[in-house]
Image (tube, rainbow, N blue to C red):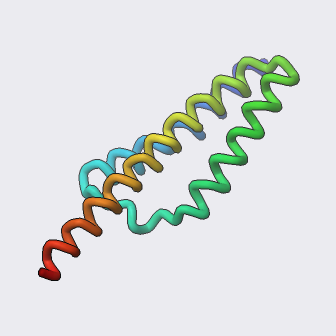
Amino acid sequence: MATLLGLAATALTTGCWLPQLLRAWRTRSTDDLSWVYLVVLGVGLSLWLAYGVVVSDPVIVMANVLSLGLMLTLAAGKARFDAERVDAERVGAR
């Protein structure tokens, strides 16, 4: 029962990243996401992942590997889209 509860929580908390990722990809904008938020969240997810490894809990490990992967994908998109925006502003200023 506890494993099913953990899997349900994993599905919901990990799945919540998908709409944000899709929106960022479609609009090519991540301006509303701060780097501080992404870094603090990344550290928190990494600590949860380490905890899951230490206590040998595969559900916690899986949840945080997936969430960390999606968060890193979003951070990579932010870096790319921010760079594209700066380049476009630089070209527009000429």
Q: Residue at x 40, y 54 (%)?
A: 79
Residue 63: % across, % down: 64, 29
Residue 93: % across, % down: 16, 82
**On the rendered structure, is 24 left or right of 69?**
left
**On the rendered structure, is 32 left or right of 69?**
left
Q: Residue at x 23, y 66 (%)?
A: 87
In the picture as drawn, the residue positioned furthest to the right comes out as 55
Q: Quadrant of residue 46?
A: top right
48 and 85: which is toward the camera? 85
Q: Tell me if residue 62 comes above or below residue 43 in the rendering.
A: above
The answer to whether residue 22 shows anywhere in this view is: yes
7 and 63: which is toward the camera? 63
Q: Quadrant of residue 14?
A: top right
In the picture as drawn, the residue positioned furthest to the bottom comes out as 93
19 and 28: which is toward the camera? 28
Assign the C terminus to one quadrant of the image.
bottom left
Q: Residue at x 21, y 74 (%)?
A: 90
Q: Residue at x 73, y 18 (%)?
A: 58
Residue 55: % across, % down: 87, 22
Q: How many marks?
A: 0
60 and 54: which is toward the camera? 54
The answer to whether residue 5 shows anywhere in this view is: no
